[in-house]
Image (cartoon, rainbow, N blue to C red):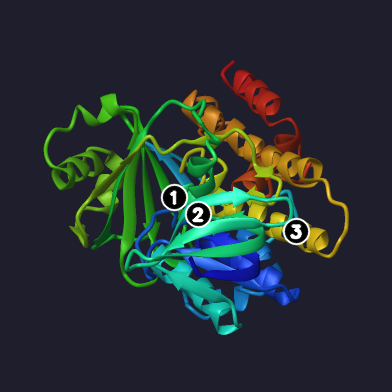
Amino acid sequence: MNQIETDVLIIGAGPAGSVAASILQREGFRVLVVEKQQFPRFVIGESMLPISMNLLADAGLLEAVQQQNFMRKNGAVFLRGDEVCNFDFSSQFTDGWNFTYQVPRADFDKTLADTVAARGVEILYRHGVTTVKFEPTHAAATIEKPDGTKFEVKAKFIFDASGYGRVLPRLLDLETPSKFPQRAALFTHITGDIRPAGSEEGKIWVCLHPQGAWIWIIPFSNGKTSVGVVAGAEFFDQFPGELDAQLRAILTSDPNAAKRLAKMEFAMPAQRISGYACSVKQLFGERFVLVGNATEFLDPVFSSGVALALASSQRAAKILVRQLRGETVDWQTEYADHVMQGINTFRAYVAAWYDDKLPTIFFAANRNPDIMRQICSVLAGYVWDKSNPYVAQADRALGLLAKILKR
């Protein structure tokens, strides 16, 4: 079997893989990226968070994104019947970006990958990793080409940014069940969205359906809008029929979504993903690290997927740079503990969303402006700012606040 050598093998050319490739190549290391699919390709996770702007800028990728004229996202609007909670990223506790973008992921991911490829990073599309083994001096991965033939990559380190493909978790038996209940997402892209005017146009809408689900509405600058619904299986059972008919019935049965989407036309067939929540036993090992959705995926409600992918990838790449230069690093403290702190903060918010603590807070008549700014910073992705009490003690703070507001 033919063999090639590189310093770092990156599995996956999505946002996490591109950020890692950009940082490692910039620091002078040889990088090879293998990607199972051909770009551009469709994927959800289209609403970014402001912290992503920091991370893209640090990796030298923000300018390329800004040139794409994506829809500017200034905040998020939560709606339940006649109740509205409108967050604006310009009013938050943490010093950070006050806007980000809504991005068709096919375009966004290809922009990042093309940018790092133009800088000299080799990306092999339609190539998959079939086996890995770890030796005392290197890691070896068997790569399958589109025609079915194989070759081996010998690398000092393997960086798994494979997202939902979760390559190393599958190959190394690192998968473990998520503690979240299994839910499903049903979604499509539409035209005919009746959008708000001005700066409100680009905000994501999250509509709480009267029968126990939530709906996303994410507008794009290309005239299309991403719409979807997330719920347990029992909710979908109330709406029989094919996926298109089912999704249309759900969207038109929520008063807020129905009004905004009264003129919608589906731009593609509806799709459904079930049981997306996942976790792993460990985030790193002797010559490998997991980043992004290859580690843990919680839930789409707060659009944390891309932000956590970029943050974990940036962190891991910078630690790996030091390790490859001969420094002693502590992957547990510097990487795993740090990443899990951010994941666990979002986990607290996702749990509070589904057990009604956050809706209680969001739709309370007597919301405290200072507290809402602190919560806004979490929704902007600044989940490592421990000076924010709604980061440092998220579970306790949200529980206590919801209890007070219910009195």
Q: Which residue is mark 2?
A: 162
Q: Quadrant of residue 188?
A: bottom left
- Residue 152 drawn at (x, y percent): 52, 63
Mark 1: which amino acid?
Gly
- Disc nearer the start of the sequence (3/1): 1
Check disc 1: other Cα within 10 Å, few if <14, some if 14-19, many if 20+. Answer: some
Q: Is residue 55 left or right of residue 172?
A: right
Identify which residue, 145 or 152, lies in the foreground.
152
Tags 2 and 3 touching, CB below 8 Å: no
Per the image, label 2 sits on a secondary structure element best described as loop
Q: Residues within 10 Å of mark 2 (few under 14, many from 20)?
A: many
Mark 3 packing: few (<14 Cα in 10 Å), some, or many (20+)? many
Q: How far across and down, in percent of the image, does residue 199 sit?
A: 49, 65
Q: Secondary structure at mark 3?
A: helix
Q: Are marks 2 and 1 in contact (CB under 8 Å)?
A: yes
The numbered mark at residue 320 is 3
Decide: is 349 above or below 258: above
Q: Residue furthest front?
A: 1
Q: Looking at the picture, tell me which residue is in the foreground, 83 or 312.
A: 312
Answer yes or no: is residue 302 visible: yes
Residue closer to the observer: 291 or 186: 291
The location of residue 153, given as percent across then percent down, is: 56, 64
Instruction: Report how far apart the C-alphas of labels 3 and 1 lie in the structure.
Output: 22 Å
Q: Quadrant of residue 219?
A: bottom left
Image height check: is 47 above or below 365? below
Name the quarter where the C terminus is drawn. Answer: top right
Q: Is residue 85 visible?
A: no
> At 71% from the left edge and 68% from the top edge, which residue is drawn?
58
Q: Residue at x 38, y 63 (%)?
A: 37
Residue position for label 1:
165
Three-letter code, disc 2: Ser
